[in-house]
């Protein structure tokens, strides 16, 4: 997500490090490069102009703080203004006093509405809500069956609506059934078209009038760039959408839609889809997104992901081992197993700040096959070798490679990764992660 833009920003700000002061020429040269980076990322040109005008005024009008370099000052200003362009504060879902709360999902065909409906239902279920799904797409073959399959996979009820072939009748019947069964949320997946037309708008408008949803959420494909922004603008003008869910932000999307959509439409991005799995849906935090773009990392989101999936007692045990320098290769193997439950290793590393020992984290690439090889290599070691990697000499490396079906080069690479990861994790355990884990430890001790 935003990898190309992140690299360009890093190069742009690097040129400022040799500057002694923030003069007009230095600012203009920097903003010229920032402008090119944003336009190449397919950011709306009006957004780019507004952003750079604000940054220039502040960069030339403010006195550089004594404790900051010119690079840090410009980065700070760019960060503040980007956050504002993205909407400032995080926009959360609105729940109604009526029972159930209705969320209406709209969008063009192919934007990922049906899958997103399932992702949103799973996200809500994890928040201790009781969602129900219903599809009102009576036109696309097997659309309702597709949602039923997704609902079964995530273990969330889906209203079948047997014998009903009117979108309005389906939605109203589903709302009644959800209320009768004690479900506090109904997610309505609507039909889409390949383009915006009067028939589509009329149908969705009628659904909105009859259902009185708390949220009308536009599902837009981030891969389509400014086309997604234009469709968001049209949907909002015709229907009064309350927010946007951007899908496929994990693909080759350059980030232009995410950076433009709030400024152009006035509506906040509330969620982003970051993978194919049903749990790959994230709340859109403007400040965290900007931190990622500028190479500052997103440790808070990483902590939240970890808290959802990682065994808390094991995490505390690893924390203690890191503090006492007793983190072994066996622990490294166990941690990799847990990381695989969180998601892509590339995504995890991408959330680390690009400074200090983390500066090359985003360049690390590790696929599923590599993780399997790592586990095989560690399993081929003796307990003593796993506890003390320094005793693994050339002879032992050859034996380990034969036993795991890998090469000596792969064994060497694993040992280097283990040392680097140990340093990273030890640094994190002393900082924000450490504070979080200490609090967690106190809670667990209080329970026991």
Image (cartoon, rainbow, N blue to C red):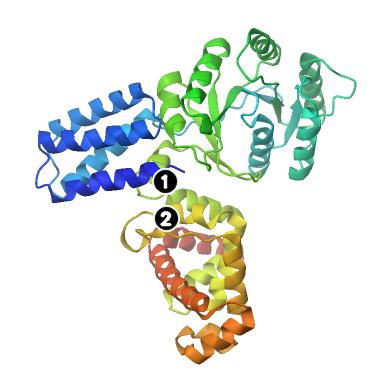
Q: Is residue 154 above or below residue 165?
A: below
Query: CA separation, marks 2 and 1?
Result: 8 Å
Q: How many marks?
A: 2
Task: Measuring from the top left, give residue 279's x and y in whole percent.
Answer: 63, 45
Give the structural element (helix, strand or loop) at label 1: helix
Q: Quadrant of the C terminus?
A: bottom right
Residue at image coords 80%, 19%: 170
Question: Measuring 29% from the left and 23% from the top, which residue is drawn there?
Answer: 50
What residue is rendered at 60% in x and 61% in y? 368
Q: State the residue at coordinates (65%, 29%).
A: 113
Residue 143, placed above or below residue 240: below
Horizontal arrangement in the rendering, residue 245 relative to residue 171 (left or right): left
Q: Is residue 117 left or right of residue 13?
A: right
Please state the horizontal and vertical placement of residue 175, each as a whole percent of the image.
77, 22
Sequence-wise, the earlier of marks 2 and 1 is 1
The 10 Å Cα crowd at callout 2, few under 14, some 14 to 19, many 20 or more, is: many
Q: Which element is circle 2 on?
A: helix
Q: Nearer the viewer, residue 346 or 178?
A: 346
User: Compared with residue 343, is residue 73 higher up or lower down, i.e. above or below?
Assistant: above
Residue labelled with disc 1: 3
Quarter of the image where one finds residue 118: top right
- Image position of 226 (left or right of 372): left
Instruction: Say which of 100 and 123 sits in front.
Output: 123
Report crowding for label 1: few under 14, some 14 to 19, many 20 or more residues within 10 A (C-alpha). some
Does the image show residue 313? no
Above/below status of 344 relative to 79: below
Q: Could you tell me residue 64's position as x and y percent? A: 13, 41
Mark number for residue 362?
2
Q: Position of residue 53 (x, y in %)?
A: 23, 25
Given contact means CB atoms under 8 Å apart, are the residues at marks 2 and 1 in contact? yes
């Amino acid at each position: 997500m935003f990898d190309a833009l992140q690299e360009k920003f890093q190069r742009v700000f690097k040129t400022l490090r040799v500057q002694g002061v923030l003069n007009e020429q230095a600012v203009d040269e920097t903003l010229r490069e920032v402008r090119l980076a944003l336009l190449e990322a397919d950011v709306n040109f009006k957004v780019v102009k507004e952003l750079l005008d604000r940054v220039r005024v502040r960069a030339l009008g403010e006195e550089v703080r004594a404790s900051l370099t010119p690079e840090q000052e410009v980065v700070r200003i760019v960060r503040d203004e980007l956050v504002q362009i993205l909407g400032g504060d995080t926009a959360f879902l609105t729940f109604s006093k009526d029972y159930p709360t209705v969320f209406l999902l709209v969008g063009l065909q192919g934007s990922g509405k049906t899958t997103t409906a399932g992702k949103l239902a799973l996200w809500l279920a994890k928040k201790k809500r009781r969602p129900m799904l219903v599809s009102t797409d009576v036109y696309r073959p097997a659309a309702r069956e597709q949602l039923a399959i997704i609902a079964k996979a995530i273990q969330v009820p889906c209203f079948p609506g047997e014998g009903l072939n009117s979108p309005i009748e389906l939605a109203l019947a589903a709302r009644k059934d959800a209320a009768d069964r004690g479900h506090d949320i109904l997610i309505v997946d609507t039909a889409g078209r390949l383009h915006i037309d009067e028939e589509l708008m009329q149908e969705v408008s009628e659904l909105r009038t009859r259902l009185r949803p708390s949220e009308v959420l536009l599902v837009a494909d981030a891969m389509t760039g400014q086309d997604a922004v234009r469709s968001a603008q049209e949907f909002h003008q015709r229907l009064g959408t309350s927010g946007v869910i951007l899908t496929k932000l994990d693909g080759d999307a350059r980030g232009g839609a995410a950076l433009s959509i709030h400024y152009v439409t006035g509506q906040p991005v509330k969620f982003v889809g970051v993978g194919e799995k049903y749990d790959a849906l994230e709340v859109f935090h403007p400040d965290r997104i900007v931190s990622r773009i500028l190479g500052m990392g997103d440790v808070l989101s990483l902590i939240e992901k970890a808290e959802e999936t990682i065994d808390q007692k094991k995490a505390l045990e690893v924390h203690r081992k890191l503090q006492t320098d007793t983190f072994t290769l066996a622990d490294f193997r166990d941690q990799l197993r847990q990381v695989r439950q969180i998601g892509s290793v590339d995504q995890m590393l991408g959330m680390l700040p690009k400074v200090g020992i983390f500066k090359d984290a985003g360049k690390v690439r590790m696929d599923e096959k590599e993780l399997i090889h790592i586990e095989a290599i560690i399993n081929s070691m003796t307990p003593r070798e796993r506890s003390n990697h320094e005793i693994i000499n050339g002879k032992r490396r050859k034996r380990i490679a034969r036993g795991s079906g890998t090469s000596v080069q792969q064994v060497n690479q694993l040992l280097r990764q283990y040392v680097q990861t140990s340093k990273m994790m030890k640094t994190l355990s002393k900082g924000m992660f450490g504070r979080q884990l200490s609090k967690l430890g106190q809670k667990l001790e209080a329970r026991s």
